[in-house]
Image: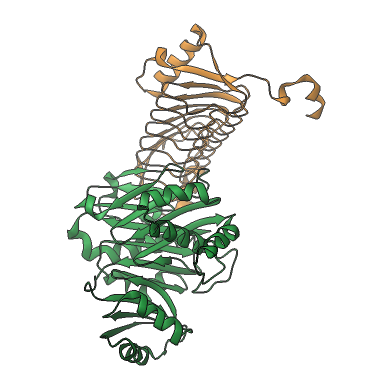
Chain colours: A orange, B green
Amino acid sequence: MNTIDLSKTPVRELNQRLHDLTPDTNERLWRITNLKGEHALAVGLTVPIEVEIDGHVGYYCAGMNKEAKVVITGHCGVGVAENIMSGEVRVKGNASQAAAASGHGGLVVIEGDASARCGISMKGVDIVVGGSVGHMSAFMGQSGSLVVCGDAGQSLGDSIYEARLYVQGSVESLGSDCIEKEMTPHHLAKLERLLSRAGIEADPRRFRRYGSARRLYSFHVDQAEQY
Amino acid sequence: MCGIVGLFLKKPELRPQLGAHLQTMLVGMTDRGPDSAGIAVYHRPVEANQCKLTTFHANPDYPWRKLGGQLAEALNAEVDVEIKANHAVITVGAAEGSARAWITRSHPEVRIMGYGQLMEVYKDMGLPADVARRYSLEGMEGSHAIGHTRMATESAVTTEHSHPFTAAPDMCLVHNGSLSNHNNLRKWLRRRGLEFETDNDSEVAARYFAYRLGEGATLAEALEAGLRDLDGFYTFTMGTRDGFAVLRDGIACKPAVLAETDDWVAMASEFRSLANLPGVEKANIWEPEPAVVYTWSLQEAA
């Protein structure tokens, strides 16, 4: 285990040390302490290491993550795991806005609440939120899944494409072109697997599923030449 | 861009450390606002028949004691003057309205930063750490305080354009964001007899809330009304005689984080400012929801 104390090591040096690791590295366990809410911790990782970030962090923690497993024990500022490609990012506290924004793959677990715009423009990432999400979550979601064990704020899934949304609690309002859909055995099995991967206990049968009605102009064949 | 911070102490034993904690929080927002900084501290209440005013003049050698003597003579009241850099805290044994009116009339070159019976307001140009040092923030005790660090984008770097803005006794406001209907709202308030000191949108918000409070609204009701009448982006933190409030617009573009323990409640634009508060590791930390009024009051905390 390598422990990096941020009261002694600057963030740039921390990130550089993590970037210099090769896929066959033996230094697979890292712990980061004394965070003081610093921004951009453990961003751009590309190798399968495990990083425990011990405390509360600032903006863009674990952004662009590939392969690595990052656990944040406290609260996260704006944009945790933004543009995640693969691997796993887990937040044990609450997260601020735009968690997992634009994520292409991998798994993001927020054990507490996420704020507005969770999973905005998601492109394949799977997101499991133990609590609730704020307004405009999964806006323009293109692919992947968002699981919300609590409630969803206004305009869930506005202008959504193919992403799948599962909410256990109430939905304040659905966004444009987002509708409730049937929970088939196929989706139930998918949801069960997502919850189990996230290690969050919930009964999948209590969730409702939402997705695209595919009625926005972008879905209409007459507009095909515009793209 | 701006940084805002607020600290409200629930536990009276912490009061001697208010200034020291607020200073750390303010300095933590230096990256968001290196041009000027301002603070409002609630402490050292004056007697019931007294008021205190925080005044400013750019000249560090301004003859405050002479002004104090004239004021004492004019109002036939006892006046005490405490000079801090280019500010002065003037305690007057008279009603706040008459003291303010005399200064405005007789010394229009002086700016009144804050007034009431508890609140002192200091704002100045420079790095937050320098401003805090200039006014000895670290040694200030008190129950609650708010602060602002400014990175000027729309108007000049001057003391006048710095926050907090005061619009009523012991009431002040810090703002991160920009209002889009401030011209109309200023006209609307002027028609109701309110006067303005700057062209700043945040001053409009401060006067709007003061107007609502003056109508008899509670702090929470005034903020609820603001959600209907203010258009634009805002995270506000407001201080009043016995309370502290946080409000964000419905879109919530401007950042905010709240943290609460049994001993204190704190807000900041970013967690960095909260990182050194005692017991923050175990605090409940969350992003305040858009269009939701958060208030804390000393009565509830007691």
Judged left or right of residue A107, residue B170 is left
User: Between A12 and B10, which is closer to the camera in this rendering?
Assistant: B10
Judged left or right of residue A60, residue A199 is left
Q: Position of residue A136 (x, y in %)?
A: 54, 34
The residue drawn where x is 33% and y is 75% is: B96
User: Between A16 and B103, which is closer to the camera in this rendering?
Assistant: B103
Judged left or right of residue B259, residue A191 is right
Q: Position of residue A21 (x, y in %)?
A: 49, 40
Please state, as top left, top right, bottom left or bottom right, where the C terminus of chain A lies in the image.
top right
The correct choice, above or below, for B152 with respect to A123 in the image is below
Q: Is residue A58 visible?
A: no
The residue drawn where x is 46% and y is 42% is: B290
Q: Position of residue A85 (x, y in %)?
A: 55, 32
The correct choice, above or below, for A22 with respect to B174 in the image is above
* Quadrant hosting residue B89: bottom left
The correct choice, above or below, for A40 with respect to A87 in the image is below
The residue drawn where x is 22% and y is 53% is: B299
Q: Is residue B242 visible?
A: yes
Q: Position of residue A120 (x, y in %)?
A: 56, 34
The correct choice, above or below, for B28 with respect to B69 in the image is above
Number of callouts: 0
The residue drawn where x is 35% and y is 52% is: B218
User: Between B191 and A117, which is closer to the camera in this rendering?
Assistant: B191
